[in-house]
Image (tube, grey):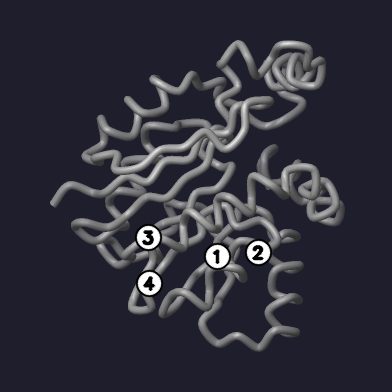
Amino acid sequence: MNKAEKFWDGSANKFDKRAERFEENMVKTIKNARKHLKDSDRVLDYGCATGTITYEIADNVKEILGIDLSSKMIDIAKSKADQSKNEKIDFTQATIFDQRLSEKYFDAILASDIIHLVEDVQKVVQRLNELLKPGGLLISSTPCLGEKKTFKGHFLFFLIFTLSKVGIVPSISFFKIPDLEHLITSENFKIIETESLSHSPEEYFIVAKKIA
């Protein structure tokens, strides 16, 4: 078990409670994502955590697979699946590089609050492109912790920065919005929609289409 997996396993039981602080951003992400999804779509929810967004999106698509590094997160997501009995949903513990994921299979990939937490960001975005069909959509929301307004008056984010540098919490990228946009467009995507979901911290929503 690597350091990141251990960290998120340890956070799983309290994850939903802590996520309530960012519920408004999540609601906006779900609403915006639904506008771009069709009932014929096969969707991957990358970094699905306990499956909250997965469930909210499921009725709008043909099928949705939630993957997460943390087995504990997936266990919680699966327990919700047992209760909902929604046959469109599946969950599995996996990284984005898992060979069980077929290239050019997905019509859309959701990446909510995950891109800033991976070690090799460019390699991950390349992989997301590989998994999408031509014309498929990457739908993401990402805290841009490099924006000055994010840090103003927020001791918590200074603490996160320090802890990430010394390896106590997983790798964190401190994006500025232009850098995040450049990262995505440099990997064969065209950005078709953006929105600032919040400003403290800066949460940036992007819909990008894979260039055929």
Amino acid identity at mark 3 = His
Viewer-side label of 1, 4: 4
Rendering quarter of residue 104: bottom left
| Measured Cα–Cα span from mark 4 to mark 2 | 16 Å
Q: Residues within 10 Å of mark 2 (few under 14, many from 20)?
A: many
Q: Is residue 69 left or right of residue 132?
A: right
Amino acid identity at mark 1 = Gly
N-terminal label among 4 and 2: 4
Looking at the image, which residue is at 77% across and 26% down? Answer: 168
N-terminal label among 2 and 3: 3
Q: Which mark is residue 187?
A: none
Q: Which mark is residue 42?
A: 4
The front one of 127 and 80 is: 80
Label 3: which residue? Answer: 36
| Dots 2, 1 in contact, CB < 8 A | yes
| Dots 2, 3 in contact, CB < 8 A | no
| Measured Cα–Cα span from mark 3 to mark 4 | 13 Å
Q: Position of residue 86 (x, y in %)?
A: 60, 85
| Dots 3, 1 in contact, CB < 8 A | no
Q: Is residue 62 left or right of residue 161?
A: left
| Measured Cα–Cα span from mark 1 to mark 4 | 11 Å
SS for callout 3: loop
Q: Which mark is residue 51?
A: 2
Q: Which mark is residue 66?
A: 1
The front one of 122 and 5 is: 122
